[in-house]
C-alpha cells in the first residue's frame, strides 16, 4: 500500500491554503481522490457546478500543486483531464527548524509525519501512551493519530519523509548533508543476533545500507515507556548517515561512492528521505525506528545541513 502526503508549512505554502479555503475545491479534490482522473465537464456535472467555476478552481488547485492536469484530444477538440496528487494534506504549525552549529541548519522531523509509505506485516505504530490503531495492519499507517508516533516497525518496505531545503531558500551552498536516527532490526520478540539491511535513500538515490546486528530487548530503553513490555523492542543504535563530495558515510566510515552532487539538492525545495528494507535485501530482518519518547535517545529524525 502506497499513499501520498503533503506536509504544509502555512508560512511558506500560502497558495495551498488559499486553494483549500473553498468548499467547492475541497469537493473537487475529494471527488478526484475517490473517482480518479476526470475531465472538467464531468466534474461540473457530478458536482452540479458551472463549468466556468470548475475551470477557475482547477487553475488554483494546479497552481498549488494539489492536482495535475493533462490536455488530450477528444472527439470535438481537446479536453483537460484532472488528477488528484495527494491523499492527505498535513498543516504543521510547530516550528522544528533551528540553527545549531555555525553554518549548519537542523530540522527535527517527528516520526509520524511521513509523506508516503509502503510496508508489510508484522508492522505497527506506537505513541508514548499506547499502540496506535491495529497491529500488523498496514492501513493503520493512515490513522490520523500517527502524528503522535514515537516508534515505527515493519518487515519490508519503507517510510518516506519530506524535509524543507532551507539552505536553498537561504541561497546557501550545501557542503554536507547528515541524517541521525535510532534504528534496529525487527523480529517477533527480540533477538540481539538478527541482522537486517536498512537502506536510506535521498531524493530517490540509495546512499547507504547499514546492517543492523539485531533487535535489542536485554534491558529497557532509557526513554521507553514503562507500559511497553520488555519482550518488545527496547532501543536501537544511533546512526549517522552523511553525504559529501567525497562519498557517503555511516558513522564516519565511507560506505558508498554516492556523492552530494548526485542528490541534486540545489534543484529542489524539499529533501526526500526514504528509510526501509528492500525486497532484495541480503538480510531482510525488518526495521524499528525510534523517535522522541522511545529508545535510548530522546530525538526524532534529525536532518543537518552544513553549508559553506
Image (tube, helix red, strand yellow):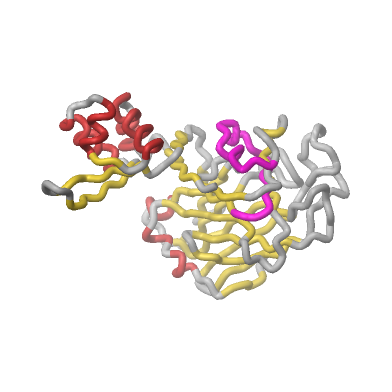
For image coordinates 62% across by 34% down, the residue present is 148
Nearer to us in this view, 169 or 290: 290
Q: Residue furthest front?
A: 75
Q: Is residue 236 magenta?
A: no
In the picture, measured across the screen, residue 219 lies left or right of residue 82, that is: right
Q: Is residue 108 positioned above or below 180 on the image?
A: above
Q: Position of residue 223 (x, y in %)?
A: 76, 40
At a point 66% along the width and 44% down the height, the residue shown is: 152
For the point 50% across and 37% down, the residue is 95
Residue 281 picture location, percent across and down: 66, 66
304 sits to left or right of 33: right
Q: Is residue 152 magenta?
A: yes
Q: Residue 289 versus residue 302: which sits nearer the camera?
A: 289
Residue toward you, 35 or 108: 35
Q: Quarter of the image holding residue 81? A: top left
Where residue 174 sits: x, y (%)?
46, 61
Coordinates of residue 16 in the picture (x, y in percent): 34, 36
Residue at position x 16%, y 32% from top?
52
- Asked whether residue 57 is in view, the answer is yes
Residue at the left extreme of this rendering: 76
The quadrant where residue 172 appears: bottom left
Instruction: Look at the image and tell me in which quarter the C terminus lies.
Output: bottom left
Q: Which residues are magenta?
A: 136-157
Amino acid at each position: 500500500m502506497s499513499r501520498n502526503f503533503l506536509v504544509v508549512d502555512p508560512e511558506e505554502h500560502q497558495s495551498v491554503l488559499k486553494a483549500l479555503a473553498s468548499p467547492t475545491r475541497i469537493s473537487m479534490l475529494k471527488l478526484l481522490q475517490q473517482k480518479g482522473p476526470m475531465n472538467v465537464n464531468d466534474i461540473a456535472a457530478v458536482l452540479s457546478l458551472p463549468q466556468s467555476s470548475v475551470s477557475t478552481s482547477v487553475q488554483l488547485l494546479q497552481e498549488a500543486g494539489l492536482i495535475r492536469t493533462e490536455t488530450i484530444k477528444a472527439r470535438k477538440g481537446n479536453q483537460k483531464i484532472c488528477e488528484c496528487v495527494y491523499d492527505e494534506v498535513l498543516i504543521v504549525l510547530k516550528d522544528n527548524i533551528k540553527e545549531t552549529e555555525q553554518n549548519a541548519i537542523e530540522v527535527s522531523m517527528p516520526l509520524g509525519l511521513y509523506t508516503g509509505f509502503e510496508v508489510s506485516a508484522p508492522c505497527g505504530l506506537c505513541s508514548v501512551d499506547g499502540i496506535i490503531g491495529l497491529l500488523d495492519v498496514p492501513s493503520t499507517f493512515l490513522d490520523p493519530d500517527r502524528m503522535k508516533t514515537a516508534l515505527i516497525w515493519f518487515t519490508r518496505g519503507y517510510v518516506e519523509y519530506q524535509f524543507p531545503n532551507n539552505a536553498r531558500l537561504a541561497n546557501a551552498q550545501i557542503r554536507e548533508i547528515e541524517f541521525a536516527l535510532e534504528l534496529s532490526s525487527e523480529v517477533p520478540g527480540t533477538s540481539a543476533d538478527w541482522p537486517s539491511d536498512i537502506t536510506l535513500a535521498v531524493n530517490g538515490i540509495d546512499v547507504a545500507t547499514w546492517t543492523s546486528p539485531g533487535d535489542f530487548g536485554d534491558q529497557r530503553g532509557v526513554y521507553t515507556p514503562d507500559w511497553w513490555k520488555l519482550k518488545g523492542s527496547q532501543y536501537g543504535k544511533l546512526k549517522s548517515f552523511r553525504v559529501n563530495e567525497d562519498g557517503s558515510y555511516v558513522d564516519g566510515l565511507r560506505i558508498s561512492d554516492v556523492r552530494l552532487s548526485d542528490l541534486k539538492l540545489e534543484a529542489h525545495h524539499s529533501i526526500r528521505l526514504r528509510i526501509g528494507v528492500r525486497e532484495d535485501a541480503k538480510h531482510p530482518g525488518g526495521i524499528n525506528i525510534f523517535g522522541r519518547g522511545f529508545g535510548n535517545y530522546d530525538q526524532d529524525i534529525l536532518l543537518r545541513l552544513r553549508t559553506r
